[in-house]
Amino acid sequence: TGKGKASAPVKIHWVGYTKASDEWVGGDRIKSKNLKFKTPESKGPGGMPPAARRLLLVKPKVEAPLDPGFRPVILGKRAYLEATKECTEKLEWALTRSDGCARYSLPVFDEKHKDVKASSYLAGVLIQEMIWQRSADELMLSGPKKICEAIKTAYSKGGAYEFEVMSMPNVCGHPDKAFAVSIVEKVEDLPASKDTPQICGTDASGCRLAFDLGKSDIKTVAVKDNEVLYSKETEWDVTNPDPQYHYDAIMDAMKLAKAALPKVDAIGGSATGTISADNEATWCDIFPNVPPDVYKEKV
């Protein structure tokens, strides 16, 4: 081992090779049944409190071979709900969006309980999951004051969930309006749950074009009555700040695919981003360098 190599402290010699092939590696590269790895607790805003580690990190019966340290959230949640089954206090929240509202209720430990930080930590994780499932422009909280304040801090700029806070305005189609977090006095002050189901087409026959916008290429496919007639991957530069460049690249690739069909009955596409209930592309991670105002106007 090497004292001056904190990130890669172990020197490996490969049997059958010369010393020129020796390599310094970190613990993440070493696999052995005789080694037990301990992950240091983070001191940053996203650190997992000891109470959360003890209650939520439940080892599955079948260990994940590629990630032995994997601990499913669902197992941790089950263990938490069992530990809090006698608790009388609850944390409730609402995630509002333009066409609906998501609600959830979680039993929590008393604010003086030694495991109360497990409550705020799990609530933060569940809120994060719901945000990416349904989107949100505001988080409203109701429950024990200290727990609500801890979550509000986590869902603020500089907090554990800063990425969600900064991303949601783009996802919801109003980048100029900051993600809001508020605490209400009574649970009755939270808006009711509301969903707006979207009906999608169920007929896949006929002549159809499809595209997928990836970080390295544009994938296009032409299908006639479920038979693929054309398929191609076209490289492009997603870092280009000019939306016209992206439009032309996509259209050129689509026109090549269209040439394989006698007609076009429908077009479908996918990209890393969000589509609103009004079928607007409110946000897309494929165009990282297109300014927000230009994106809103042209994309």
Image (cartoon, rainbow, N blue to C red):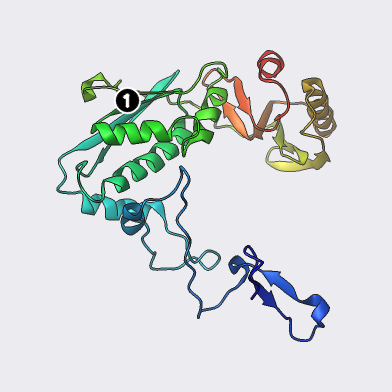
Relative side of 10 to 197, left or right = right
Residue 126 in which image quadrant: top left
| Residue at position x 30%, y 32% in the image | 148
Q: Is residue 55 above or below residue 221?
A: below
Which of 250 and 168 lies nearest the eye of the viewer? Answer: 168
Q: Residue furthest top?
A: 297
How many labels were placed on the picture? 1
Relative side of 36 to 195, left or right = right
Q: Amino acid at mark 1?
A: Ser
Question: Residue 11, position in %: x, y?
Answer: 68, 75
Q: Is residue 104 visible?
A: no
| Residue at position x 65%, y 16% in the image | 296
Relative side of 195 to 221, left or right = left
Q: Which residue is mark 1?
A: 193
Which of 43 and 251 lies nearest the eye of the viewer? Answer: 43
Which of 13 and 58 lies nearest the eye of the viewer? Answer: 13
Question: Residue 263, position in %: x, y?
Answer: 77, 26
Q: Is residue 242 above or below residue 40?
A: above
Q: Is residue 181 visible?
A: yes
Residue 100 in which image quadrant: top left
Q: In which quadrant is the C terminus drawn?
A: top right
Question: Residue 201, position in %: x, y?
Answer: 55, 29
| Residue at position x 68%, y 32% in the image | 206
